[in-house]
Image (cartoon, rainbow, N blue to C red):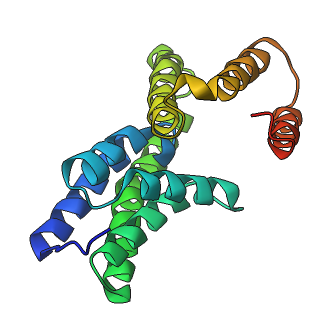
Amino acid sequence: MTTIVLTWSDWLNLFGHYLLLSLMSVGGAISTTAEMHRLLVEQHHWLTPQQFNDAIALAQAAPGPNVLFVALMGWKVGINAGSYTAAMLGVAVTMTGIMLPSTTLTYMASQWLHRNRDLRGVRAFKQGMAPVVVGMLVATGIILATTSAATLAHWPLWALSLTAGIIIWRTSIHLLWLLGAGAVLGWFQLV
């Protein structure tokens, strides 16, 4: 990828965008990856689709919070801008932007919700947010799947994903067993 040029206005806009994404991240930062992809890959071309997917894959594989992919995206934007200083700025901008509003709002809301947990409206809100989170996660899955396995040649991967989803939905089998089964299938290059 060629070096990109980012002005202070671009960094400020990136920070503002991540502030807004933070307020949308009801299911965690991962639920907003579709919008991050639109901004970073499609609109500004600050990341390639491969860099975007790699940041998510690496952060998900590493131990710790899954929000680390945001730091990796900020790092990659800075590296693409041409320096380690810009990479550190990218990490600071994206992580502060994604963490500040949601952390503050979560703290304040959890205090209020705990005090009012028996109210009908509070219970309805909690139940109503579940489909929103699921929808955002499905959008994320579609973005990740279509960039890396968009053709019918990858049908075993699609079949495995669909099967795992149905098993998770319909049974009480622990998710780690399915991850292990997927790892074995991948080891033997069956998917």
Residue reaching furthest front? 153
Is residue 86 among the parts visible in the rendering?
yes
- The residue drawn where x is 53% and y is 22% is 130
What percent of the width, then of the height, locates residue 123? Answer: 53, 18
- Left or right: residue 176 versus residue 5 is right
Which residue is at the front of the view, 175 or 47?
A: 47
Identify the image quadrant of the N terminus.
bottom left
Q: Quadrant of the C terminus?
A: top right
Q: Residue at x 83, y 32 (%)?
A: 178
Depth order, front residue of 131/126: 131
Image x and y of residue 86, in percent: 31, 82
Is residue 25 in view from this perspective? Answer: no
Judged left or right of residue 1, residue 165 is right
Residue at figure coordinates x 48%, y 15% from the top left: 124
Q: Identify whether 96 is placed above or below 20.
A: below
**Residue 170 left/right relative to 9:** right
Q: Position of residue 80 (x, y in %)?
A: 32, 73
Where 33 falls versus 134 (above or below)?
below
> Total label count?
0
